[in-house]
Amino acid sequence: APRSLTPRGPCTTPGQVPLALPASLPLAAQRPPVPLGPLPTPGTAIAKPSTSRGRAAARRAACESRWVAVLQSCGPASSLFEAISASENFSEHAARIIANFEPSTLEPYLSVAEELLCHAQFTCMGVRRLNAAGLADFLLACRHARRQDRQPPAGAQAALRAIRWLARYADCPALQALVYTPLMASFASRGGPRDRREAMPLPLSVVAAWEAYMCRPASSSSLAVKLFLGAALCCIHASLRFGDAQRVDVAALQLGTDALRASAWQTKTTRQGQPFALRLFGLTGRSVDTAWALHWLQAIAQASPAADADFLFPAVSLASGDSAPRFLAPLGYCQALRFCRWACALPWLPRSQAALLPLEAQSIT
């Protein structure tokens, strides 16, 4: 029987400082906001500032270490391991094999590979003795785990893709002979009609309300909220994904006469940088006082970002002795989604509808 699958852990990022919300927001005055905890009080320990590039490098280093461990667990079953195991630069040679893959791709693949190796070790004493029945049992366990929301989070289809990736790049002949059989191919077909999963765009009333909030004076608004809503409006008007916005150098924002321009140093589709631009006035702006982008730039200046800040959605906090939030670290996806749904819960948008809005709605609105 395959190894028992452990429950999925909380959706947090190591070292992430939560983005705190004020006690009340004028946009949702008639509906109490979801309590996310107060801002840290002066004297609270603050984590060191981090960057998106630093976190990406740390994730890649972790993936390389896991990949080396996977190859060592495969042992003689991997022709790649047999070829480079005697080298003093074994780790460097192994890292070159996965250099073209992003950590977001490697992490789920390596998770499935580690589970498969444990399954093979417990059932048939290694990958070389893994047969079609044992691999089919593992894929079936992945399908059941997906339905029960347990690890590995990948279903049978994603697990089969990961196993095929392992068989190819670890060069495991015995595994390659199994993953393309008709029995394994049956796990790759969905079967039956399915609805397309499409993100719903944000209502224009929400966008207009966010722009109006950005133009409010400091006495009736929150700087932390302005930092988030400004980045969200940037994604909306520039058609940026959340991940792309977290790869933009703050120092590279260029203000023009009627537009704000910048470039993402890496996106989902390119590694060479992607320039973008957006109009300063948005949907509701008619003058300099109502240009939401100018107020967002002013909020960023008040937050005093570091010179190497390379993200637009910050996890802000109150530093000891400071009276205003500052850029601290990139905001995690789960916290950004929570804040986005909280900010969408306007008096004319029921909370039940706001809970259905994904973070990807910003890039398609």
Image: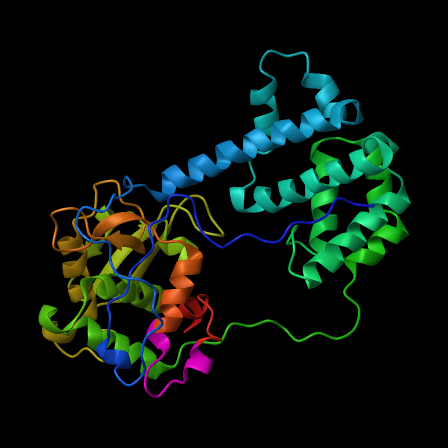
Quarter occupied by residue 88: top right
The percent position of residue 334, horizontal first and vertical second, equals 44, 59
**Residue name at image x 11 percent, y 55 percent:** 323
Quarter occupied by residue 37: bottom left
- Say whether residue 275 is left or right of residue 267: left
Image quarter (top left, top right, bottom left or bottom right) of the C terminus = bottom left
Q: Nearer the viewer, residue 101 or 256?
A: 101
Quarter occupied by residue 34: bottom left
**Residue name at image x 89 percent, y 44 percent:** 132
The percent position of residue 198, horizontal first and vertical second, equals 55, 72
Q: Is residue 243 above or below residue 204?
A: above
Q: Nearer the viewer, residue 89 or 11?
A: 11
Q: Which residues lie in the magenta part?
A: 343-354
Is 346 contained in the magenta span?
Answer: yes
Q: State the colouring used for the structure image.
A: rainbow
**Residue name at image x 14 percent, y 54 percent:** 301
Number of marks drawn: 0
Query: Does residue 125 appear in this view?
Result: yes
- Say whether residue 108 is left or right of residue 54: right
Q: Is residue 165 above or below residue 312?
A: above
Query: Does residue 156 appear in this view?
Result: no
Q: Nearer the viewer, residue 356 or 209?
A: 356
Is 136 contained in the magenta span?
Answer: no
**Residue name at image x 40 percent, y 66 percent:** 338
The percent position of residue 225, horizontal first and vertical second, equals 25, 66
The percent position of residue 254, horizontal first and vertical second, equals 21, 54
